[in-house]
Amino acid sequence: MDGLLSQLLAFPPHPPPKIPLTDTAYDKGMKELIQTLNKTPASKLTLGVRGGGDLLEIIDPSINSLPYLFVLLSHVGAPGGKQKNANAADGFTPGTPLWLKMLAFMESFDPVQTRYAGNEFRRLFEITAGRAAFTERPNDQSTAISALGSAILRIDPSGSTFTSSHLLFVHLCLLMRAYPESLPVLDHNIYHFTSNTNRAAENNLYPHLSSNHENSSTFIIPESGLSSKLDYRSHLLFFLYGAMCYMGLKEWKRALLFLEIVIMSPISQNASRIQVEAYKKYILVGILYKGSLLDMPKKTNPQAAKQFKAMAKAYEGLAEVFQHKLREAGSVKRLVDEVKAGQPIWGQDCNFGLVRQVIDAYRQYSIRALEKTYAALTIAEITRRTSADADDFAGTGDYVINLISSNKLNATISQPSEDPATWIVRFYDPASGPLARSEEQQYEALAKQTRKVKVLADHIREVDRKLSLSKEYIQDAKKRKSHDDNGGGDDGYPFGHDTGFIGADEDVMGD
């Protein structure tokens, strides 16, 4: 065991040498370490050490991440599905010592080392997520999800390359209703999908996994093992699940963005059921966020748009009633009747929770509509205009106070007496009142937007670079050059007018 331990701890050298290892030397050492670990039986990695305990008690996961990962997996089930530990199921559950070691590893592993063991890392991630899905203790759920989210962002701090771990993570968050815990991963925009570009050209730019990769999509590739096989459906599900997590937090703007991505995704012949479900939710979230029936996203496939409308008539009807009654400043009764009539549909689609919020949103938007016409109104007048119970002054007063305190209404309220009917609500335009932004806040918002644009531009440049390395681009460029040499024109499109959208069943990780 002492001989094995010395082999496992030999690389990378610790403390680090004064002159850092070159990428070539580091790469060579890591590959030799992987060979040693793959040759070592799982039964040997789980043996005890002199003085008691096992290798997990000695190895530091932040320094020697690969040995720790392989030993940890050997206790759960050997890498690659070799010899399995019969006691793994009992020893690796939330709250056990082995589970706590996994949590520590997920929060501290070296991300560069882990690039060399993508399959093993993904296996541990998937086993952990599977165990976490069956725990009922909220604290165990929260710590497991936080550790998994941390692991995704340790591998890829930008969170910009879509992997199977993203899908598994957000699905787990949705099942456990751990919506806040999903945000560290979901708030990072996805810009890239794992794919095979011109590997020879990529290897010239980034010859080693340990190279300083400017973008995660150059090392999170199909052969890395960091993601299992993904297809078109995986992409749709991730954004639908993500939208549902944002809905759980009432972050309607971000939820709409995710739903739009699903709706606008290309189709081969027919829209998928996932897209239809997304469109139904898109209508409801649009009501909650904007108070109206939103237009179909501009880039939606025309054939898909027709199918969406045909299968979501009840939802569009609800939105139209909402808009019509809002314009008339009418009673909420007609809207409530519409909701009751469609209960079987909302229930079958698991959208009843959102539909119930539509009724509350009607009252909110009815009050917000008053600020466009009036400078001030008493609670008695607001109650008469917006409440189902014209005498519920106290309820309306509390509701208006809640809207103001949650920054949903740009207004102030004065209370000249204890009688809520006499309270006065004063409305303000966007440039004044409690919701008006100072110059400093406007500058910070502008700076934040500028940073987002810069990040987007960087990712677009990376996509263009990858496109220029693809076989299809090179072949098309040769044809265009030949065409130009023979006196032909250039229409300005690198691939002509047909962009060749992928079909519904195409493998996103394909060549």
Image: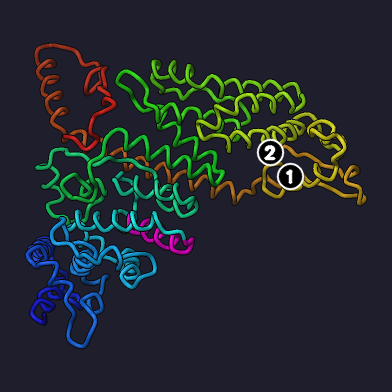
Residue that carries the numbered disc 2 in the rendered image: 430
Q: Which amino acid does the dot numbered 1 rest on?
A: Gly
Q: Which element is circle 1 on? A: loop
Residue farthest toward the bottom in the current orientation of the protein:
51
Residue at horizontal 33%, vertical 40%?
A: 191
For residue 50: magenta?
Answer: no
Q: Is residue 349 visible?
A: yes
Q: Secondary structure at mark 2?
A: loop
Where is residue 268, by image quadrant?
top left
Query: Where is residue 479 shown, x and y percent of the image?
Result: 11, 20
At 19% from the left and 77% from the top, the residue drawn is 14
Percent coordinates x, y for residue 102 in the rendering: 31, 66
Q: Amino acid at mark 2?
A: Pro
Magenta stretch, residue numbers: 137-152
Q: Residues within 10 Å of mark 2 (few under 14, many from 20)?
A: few
Relative vertical location of residue 261 with respect to residue 58 in this rendering, above or below? above
Residue where numbered disc 1 is placed: 433
Q: Are marks 2 and 1 in contact (CB under 8 Å)?
A: yes
- Give left or right: position of 332 versus 345: right
Within the image, what quadrant is residue 340 found in? top right
Image location of residue 463, percent across then percent down: 26, 37
Q: Position of residue 319 (x, y in %)?
A: 61, 24
Write down the quadrant of residue 10 in the picture. bottom left
Main structural element of the magenta stretch: helix, strand or loop? Answer: helix
Q: Is residue 149 within the magenta segment?
A: yes
Q: How many marks?
A: 2
**Picture residue at 49% right of the left edge, 50% below the top:** 177
